Amino acid sequence: MADYPPIAEHGLIGDLQTAALVATDGSVDWFCAPRFDSPSVFGALLDTDSGGYFRINPGNARGKQLYVPDTAVLITRFMTEAGVGEVIDFMPISGKIRTNNHSLIRLVRCVRGTMTFHVDLAPRFDYGRQPHETHLDENGAVFETPTEAMTVHLVREPDDRRLARTWVDDGGDIHAELTLHAGDLRGLILETGAAGPIREVRVAEARRLLDDTVHYWTTWLDRSTYQGRWREAVERSAITLKLMTYAPSGGLVAAPTAGLPEQIGGERNWDYRYTWVRDASFSVYALLGLGFTDEAADLGRWLADRVDEQDDVKGNEPLQIMYRVDGSSDLTEEVLDHWEGYRGSAPVRIGNGASGQLQLDIYGEAMDSLYIADQDGLAAGHRGWGKISEMLSWLCDNWDQPEEGIWETRGGRQDFTYGRLMSWVALDRGVRLATERGRPAPLTRWIRERDAVYEQIMEKGWSPARQAFRQHYATDVLDSSLLRMSNTGFLVPTDPMWQSTLDAMTTELVTDSLVYRYDPAASPDGLQGSEGTFSLCTFNYAEALARSGRLDQARMTFAKMLTYANHLGLYSEEIALTGEQIGNFPQAFTHLALINAALVLDKAL
């Protein structure tokens, strides 16, 4: 499995409609087009032999990566005795108009000496299920399948035709060798959704595209109001979240990848290229905290649209737990049997079978974000308020039942304490909005049900034996989702019941500051194997410590967690006990939690 680079050895680029992962060896080994949730063009991350890749490097060399400061423009540097070279990767911003045409630009520069770059362009359309034909000419190439097309334009000057030697192999893949001297800049522009015309792109035009992309990102980041202690980490997280936003709808994908394992060789491999109601809700708070009101408003509108639709495709629930980036709800799960999975971690799943689960917590997260948005001047209109009232009326009838829970377990429904907690939040925020804004509402009923949820949690969610709130009513197992209990207003952070819960979690779920979601051995979740510590939960733990007055412990937990970022400041879903990043990468949830923890810590300190 040596052909698979570590998950953390990647950088992310994108254009606000799709994204690509670039490894430190100069290989684009994950890229889907035209959207995040579209079939892959390059998927070597999940199968080195049949996934497809686009590699540029000076041979068997690992590079060093950095972003152009305050941007999503990625530079991979290679150093040899003969010279120093760079591959500059970026995607010009596509904006809010949906399009099938996306450009992935790879510029190659020799900084010092002389360097020969090897170029290997091997697309595998539709997760490697569609063969392609290749048409090559002196200015580039066209790849075509029965349903897709992609064009490659060369970046060069008219008088340097002999710089590169190019050929096509029997499988239709393109290979080239490009020799550059100090100061030379050349490259390739990959354009999806187009079967030509191929054209020669002059170097000056490519530089303009690069300058425009740098300008977009630096101008966007200038809107940040964050001036706290962890500015570099927070701003990189903000850029990463922006990269994972589908601009036409405002939806935020949980991660741009699918199938990266929570345990190497295990079966916990899920497709995260969709927008969860939960993630969108948390994002509103984080983005408003950094001053990105436009992005928060877009996410709020995306969320409001889902509430407005009252989607009943999967049953009579007002909301589905996740949607495609355009808001559609078909996420049928299937297995790619022809792919071996990252380092043999099978099955590789696309789609997500958890989309039809009942997860009651999403209503609390949705209402909390709508309430926060309302406090910032983003209020719901008359029709929107009507739909909110309908949703809360449904919740009044349905909160007291077993569910699958926040972690999307596949071991059967339970009365999860976190689901009850967030049902209380949903009703509480509805009452607040109605009373503060003078909106019509069945307040007597909402208040009665809110209080009933509170009393039930205190009676059944509390474990006298553990002196802590438990995962669900039929167990004494702990669950780190309840780290959010103290910031919802359900309990004050100084409450002895909360303090003892935090102590119990520290003993059972925390290892050297890293936090597990729960113990699958003690609370079976219907899946084989184990998992790493959950990065989201570690940042939530730091936030909970800060809110509870344990500032020294909170600051050390946060500082340790920052050391687990990759070389670019990016985080996957989980951290293995070896410190290796595992799970889908990068994960929005983790970067959201980093921002929120930093904001709370800054305020507390």
Image: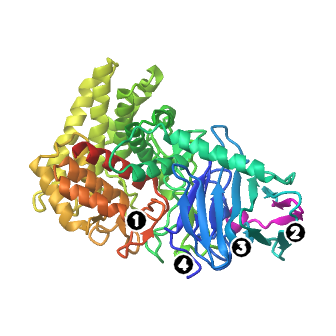
Structural distance between the alpha carbons of marks 2 and 4: 42 Å
Return the disc, 2 or 4, that comes first in the chain's sequence: 2
Start and end of the magenta stretch? Answer: 124-145
Question: Circles 1 and 4: CB distance less than 8 Å?
Answer: no
> Which numbered mark, 3 or 1, is in the foreground of this view?
3
Foreground pick, 163 / 55: 163
Identity, as a three-letter code, of the amino acid under mark 2: Arg
Question: Circles 3 and 1: CB distance less than 8 Å?
Answer: no
**Residue identifier under label 2:** 162
Residue 152 within the magenta-colored segment of the rendering: no
Foreground pick, 168 / 58: 58
Q: Which class describes the residues within 10 Å of circle 2: few (<14), some (14-19), or many (20+)?
A: few
Name the element at disc 1: strand
What's the image's color scheme?
rainbow
**Residue identifier under label 3:** 115
Return the disc, 1 or 4, that comes first in the chain's sequence: 4
Estimate the x, y position of residue 451 in percent, counting from the top left.
19, 36
Could you say which quadrant of the image residue 515 lies in? bottom left
> Which numbered mark, 2 or 4, is in the foreground of this view?
2
Estimate the x, y position of residue 213 in percent, counting from the top left.
63, 46
Identified at 40% across, 57% down, the residue is 408
Q: Which residue lies furthest to the bottom in this view?
A: 2
Name the element at disc 2: loop
Residue 127 visible in image: yes
> Which numbered mark, 1 or 2, is in the foreground of this view?
2
Estimate the x, y position of residue 57 in percent, counting from the top left.
67, 72
Foreground pick, 390 / 343: 343
Could you say which quadrant of the image residue 574 lies in? bottom left
